[in-house]
Image (tube, helix red, strand yellow):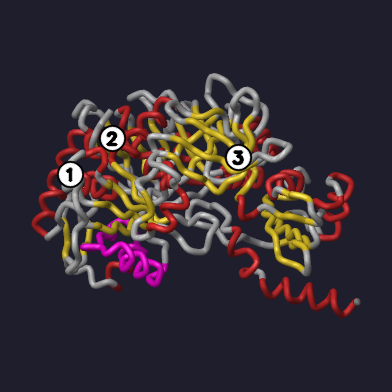
Amino acid sequence: MATWVHQLIETAPDAAWAVIDADGQRYSYGALRNLTGILSDQLAAHGVRPGDRVMLVCENCASYAVAVMAASRLAAWIVPVNARHTGEELRAIRDHCGARCMLFTASVSTVAQAHADDFGADASLALGCGDLRATACADVRPEPVEDDPGQRVAALLYTTGTTSAPKAVMLTHRNLCWNGQVSARLRDLTRDDLVLAILPGSHIFGFSSTLFATFHIGACARFEPRFTPEVALRAFAEGVSAMPAVPQMYERILTHLDSTGATLNAPRLRYISAGGAPLDPDLKARVESVFGLALNNGYGITECSPTIAATRPDAPRGDVSCGTALWDVNLSIDAPDADGIGEIVIESPGVMKGYYRNPEATAAALPRAGVFRSGDLGRIDPDGALHVLGRLKELIIRSGFNVYPPEIEAMLTRHDDVLQAAVVPRKAAGNEEILAFVMARNGLTETALADWLRPRLVAYKQPQDIFIVDAFPIAPTGKVLKHKLVSHFAERLAARDAGRKDRE
């Protein structure tokens, strides 16, 4: 296994394709290695040192991949951040990580270009695959560099997660190279595969499980900076063979096919998977019917590099479990209740080094090196399959009963006119309320949906309020930001509460 992240691109034949950009430009592994050397020299001349944090404000493209590999060659820490973040968010990350400089994929991203202007990125690093703009180097202190290359931090990723205070996850070269290896093995990738890299490369799913898995085996990544159903369908038609994605992407593809009457044309597609959010059983069934392939499901966390468990292509499952633990990963359930449900604890080579500049959170999450307390609720079947039931902090205790939001969400999405559902708790006098937010079609009303749900769930699992909404607050991956739902729809909640008081 590679010791350094940049070594992931060392073993593929020079002439093999490594990257296809959204504009169709192709770059071989030989070209990628050459560009990595050019950029690492330019960054060193610019003032980047081992142990420095290099912040990369990006969308998916060849220059993004080159920047990641170049930072690795310099033993610097890459800090990939989605260019769709606001300037305020970028400043907070820059200041927290103590970035030596900021890089922007400005030549392929209008939002990155706007940020480059805003941050005064006057230096231009010419690559020939989309130039990068860079800010001047700040007067910051580099972090100490470990003697063991595998223990050196390769990347600092800021989590969106389900909490309102993102943390900076330190992932080592060994963490990320291990994940690239097992992710490639999980998907049976070969050098003939063309992998659709449409998940944001700033997110751990696109960064590690997509890019590094592709490079580990010497396959080719087809970059797309942003997801749309049309972009994905065109990539399928042009020979994509594997697509890791989030469930919301499949939902949008199916909706597009249904609304346009188009048919799926995917002559080489052989592997599809979902992760990053709960997989609804109805969506799984519909995707498998349209694609004619098993939709593999997985469980991963940024702090674990991220992959932990997944279903296997050669052993498809009829349920929506996350499959069994990956090779070298051990799972356990801490403090299980009578139904075997408790906190998922992970022991894995992918477990992070810790949270940057947050020793208290690190101590709470890592009882010992290589072991991570996930904060997720789950249970493990006798055959080893993991079922993730939500966040420990999202557990709703209603009238003394434990209620798990994914169970209610799964039932809601069984309704033909429900496209997506998100369930969260809200404190009430001496109790907790269940709030359901639903995206629907065909004029489905909140009252009609509540009537439909009533005979299908026990009374203590019935939502106290259902809200039909046009859209959810989401992360760049499409993951619903549940912690923002109550504040996002505060006016509607207040109006509903006021109406209830008037009736009383």
Distance between the alpha carbons at the discs numbered 1 and 2: 18 Å
Separation of residues labelled 2 and 3 (CA atoms)? 31 Å
Closer to us: 62 or 203: 203
Q: Earlier in the sequence, mark 1 or mark 3?
A: 1
Specify start and end residues of the magenta stretch as a single range: 86-114
What's the amino acid at mark 1? Answer: Arg
Quadrant for the N terminus in the image:
top left
Q: Which residue is mark 3?
A: 262
Q: Which element type, helix, strand or loop, lies under badge 1?
A: helix
Residue drawn where x is 74% and y is 55% of the image = 397
Determine which residue is flagged by label 2. Answer: 18
Is residue 92 or residue 357 the one in the foreground?
357
Query: Closer to the observer: label 1 or label 3?
Result: 1
**Where 465 sits versus 3, above or below?**
below
The x, y position of residue 363, in whole percent, is 42, 52
**459 or 235: which is nearer to us?**
459
Query: What kind of element bears circle 3?
Result: loop
Q: Position of residue 149 (x, y in %)?
A: 21, 39
Q: Is residue 354 left or right of residue 264?
A: left
Residue receiving disc 1: 73
Circle 2 — which element? strand
Report the residue at 46% width, 49% height from top.
Answer: 365
